[in-house]
């Protein structure tokens, strides 16, 4: 069993397998591809148009009108045409009072969506980090199990050789076989967990990790 312990304790560390530079690329990819962020960007753009519309609506407060009034006077020889115009300029005082509040409301909605996007980006970054760490953890654990399995295989071969020569008991031989079998099952289980962790991370990325260098 000493060989198993030494094989598992080879200084393999999750921290050594992490790449902060690669993680930042994953985060940026998620920010670019994640559908909800695209929805929030569209809402922010729409809110910006609403602010502009609210500002331009100030012109709706004022109205201009004129009245054209043709007329004439009969003269002895030719009629003398006389034309008059009446102009009017009006302002809706009630609308004038309401407009600043409408502009502030439009800006407030735009800011609220911006804050919502910022909060979602923070949550998305945290989730990408967590899933990336889980993925690396599983890969690192697989290396440990794989190295341990190599040691167990070596022990099994040694015990089998001694058992066939009559130098080892059947009980110890069976223990060696069982240890190898259990470790092989553990290896298969971790390989499946790696695929699951990778798939969970790619869900946030919107693409395969192999395409992110």
Image: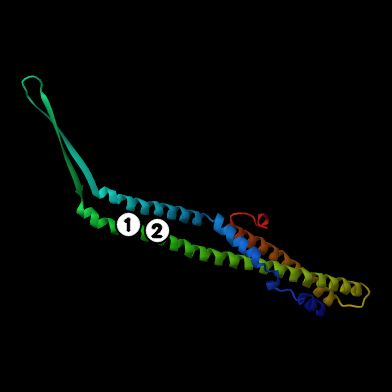
Q: Nearer the viewer, residue 186 or 18?
A: 18
Q: Residue furthest right?
A: 165
**Mark 1 packing: few (<14 Cα in 10 Å), some, or many (20+)?**
some
Q: Residue furthest bottom?
A: 2
Residue drawn 88% across the image and 73% down it = 158
Q: Which residue is mark 1?
A: 103
Is 67 situated above or below 190?
above
Q: Foreground mark, 2 or 1?
A: 1
For this view, does 192 lie left or right of residue 154?
A: left
Residue 159 seen in this snapshot: yes
Q: Which residue is mark 2?
A: 110
User: Residue 128: x, y in percent?
Assistant: 58, 64
Residue at disc 1, secondary structure: helix
Q: Nearer the viewer, residue 100 or 19?
A: 100
Q: Nearer the viewer, residue 201 or 75?
A: 75
For this view, does 22 lie left or right of residue 157?
A: left
- Res 77 quadrant in image: top left
User: Residue 41: x, y in percent?
Assistant: 47, 55
- Res 145 quadrant in image: bottom right
Is 75 situated above or below 16?
above
Residue drawn 76% across the image and 75% down it = 8
Residue 204 seen in this snapshot: no
Residue at disc 2, secondary structure: helix
**Mark 2 packing: few (<14 Cα in 10 Å), some, or many (20+)?**
many
- Screen quadrant of the C terminus: bottom right
- Res 172 quadrant in image: bottom right
Q: How many angstroms separate mark 2 from mark 1 (CA)?
A: 11 Å
Q: Are marks 2 and 1 in contact (CB under 8 Å)?
A: no
Q: Earlier in the sequence, mark 2 or mark 1?
A: 1
User: Residue 125: x, y in percent?
Assistant: 55, 65
Residue drawn 70% across the image and 72% down it = 16
User: Residue 196: x, y in percent?
Assistant: 63, 61
């Amino acid at each position: 069993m000493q060989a198993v312990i030494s094989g598992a304790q080879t200084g393999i560390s999750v921290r050594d397998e992490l790449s902060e530079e690669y993680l930042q690329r994953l985060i940026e990819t998620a920010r670019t591809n994640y559908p909800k962020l695209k929805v929030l960007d569209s809402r922010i753009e729409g809110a910006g148009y609403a602010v502009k519309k609210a500002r331009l609506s100030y012109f709706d407060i004022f109205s201009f009108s004129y009245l054209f009034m043709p007329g004439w006077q009969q003269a002895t020889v030719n009629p003398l045409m006389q034309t008059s115009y009446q102009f009017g300029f009006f302002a809706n005082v009630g609308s004038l009072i309401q407009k600043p509040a409408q502009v502030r409301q439009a800006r407030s909605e735009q800011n609220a969506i911006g804050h919502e996007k910022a909060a979602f980006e923070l949550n998305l970054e945290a989730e990408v980090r967590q899933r990336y760490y889980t993925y690396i953890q599983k890969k690192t654990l697989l290396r440990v199990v794989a190295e341990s399995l190599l040691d167990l295989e070596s022990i099994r071969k040694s015990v089998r050789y001694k058992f066939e020569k009559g130098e080892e008991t059947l009980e110890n031989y069976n223990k060696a076989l069982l240890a190898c079998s259990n470790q092989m099952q553990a290896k298969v289980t971790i390989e499946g967990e790696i695929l699951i962790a990778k798939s969970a991370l790619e869900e946030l990325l919107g693409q395969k990790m192999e395409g992110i260098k």
